[in-house]
Amino acid sequence: MTTISSPSARRGRRARQSGGDAVFAGVSLAAGIAILVVLAGVAVFLIVQSVPAFSAAKSDIPGAGSLLGYLAPLAFGTVLSAVLALLFAVPLAVAIALFITHYAPRRLAQALGYLVDLLAAVPSVVFGLWGIFWLAPKLVPLYLWLNDNLGFLPIFGSPSVTGRTILTASLVLAVMILPIVTAICREVFLQAPKLQEEAALALGATRWEMIRMAVLPFGRAGIVSGAMLGLGRALGETLAVALVLSVDPTLITANLIGTTNPSTIAANIALQFPESFGVSVNILILSGLLLFVITFVVNLAARTIVAKSAVKV
């Protein structure tokens, strides 16, 4: 039996719906404005507190005695460790996500997905302790082998006997960002059109050919998004890097397994801030502003790449 509602009842429902839409729109707008206000407040604070650093005496600037000589090694170490972590983590994350979504039995896939998500909850200090007490000593024989066989390459120069190198720190960062990238890739691969997957299999494609033709093109934007989120986490990681690295904050070197390594901005701030005072604090805040700019540029580039990938798909 069909019930015919009166015009007044329909108007009442429309009024309630429009009221709810208005409240939701207002809350969403307020949240968006709040994010912009917080971001602008952080930027203004960093800029204002960084201004005294530009007039600092050379004796107050660590290292080379100039801001460029101080900031350049920190920026180099930050970008180098994060990019290396991304190179290690992204292929493994994509492989794990594909295994969970398209190869593993359902129960095994659920268990693996839970373990990956659980890995994201491990505190960074635990990763740092694991890196310095277990991973670093285990990598020393590998570093010696790399130096013996590939020592003609600048990246495998004189090896560290402790394993506390930029390469070790990058591996620790790779493990830390692995669950983030894996979780995003997994959710994106699960959203791949089933009809396209079934059509590819029906036409005689193998499972890998189906993934290559139907799943990976669809998930390209998601892979890039996950990689950029992982890169942002790696750029800002502090404690794990500070624990693992044996640093020289003024050093720029291509040697990935050396005894001394360039520091990262976040780790340098964490190590130097407790003993800093006066203009030294402003110099550290200036380095934080540089990290803020690097992170902003990375996210802007990620948005551009994702937008282009979405158009192509």
Image (tube, rainbow, N blue to C red):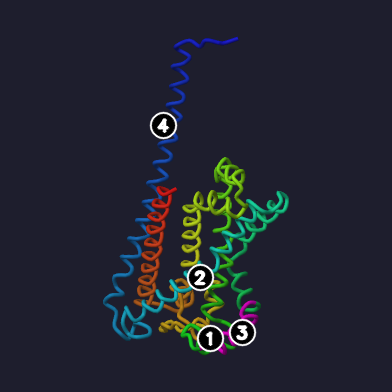
Which residue, given by chain and number where applicable, does mark 1 sit on? 150
Q: Which mark is residue 238?
A: 2
Q: In the picture provided, is 24 more to the left or to the right than 192? A: left
Q: Nearer the viewer, residue 36 or 204?
A: 204
Q: Nearer the viewer, mark 1 or mark 2?
A: 1
The range drawn in magenta is 135-151
Mark number displayed over residue 303: none
Mark 3 → mark 1, Cα distance in angstroms? 15 Å
Label 2, label 4: how many angstroms apart (C-alpha)? 42 Å
Residue bearing the label numbered 3: 140
Task: Find the distance from the CA under tag 1 to the CA under tag 2.
Answer: 31 Å
- The foreground one among 219 and 209 is 209
Number of the front mark, 3 or 1: 1
Q: Give the Cα separation between the discs numbered 3 and 2.
A: 23 Å
Q: Which class describes the residues within 10 Å of circle 3: few (<14), some (14-19), or many (20+)?
A: many
Q: Amino acid at mark 1?
A: Leu
Q: Secondary structure at mark 4?
A: helix
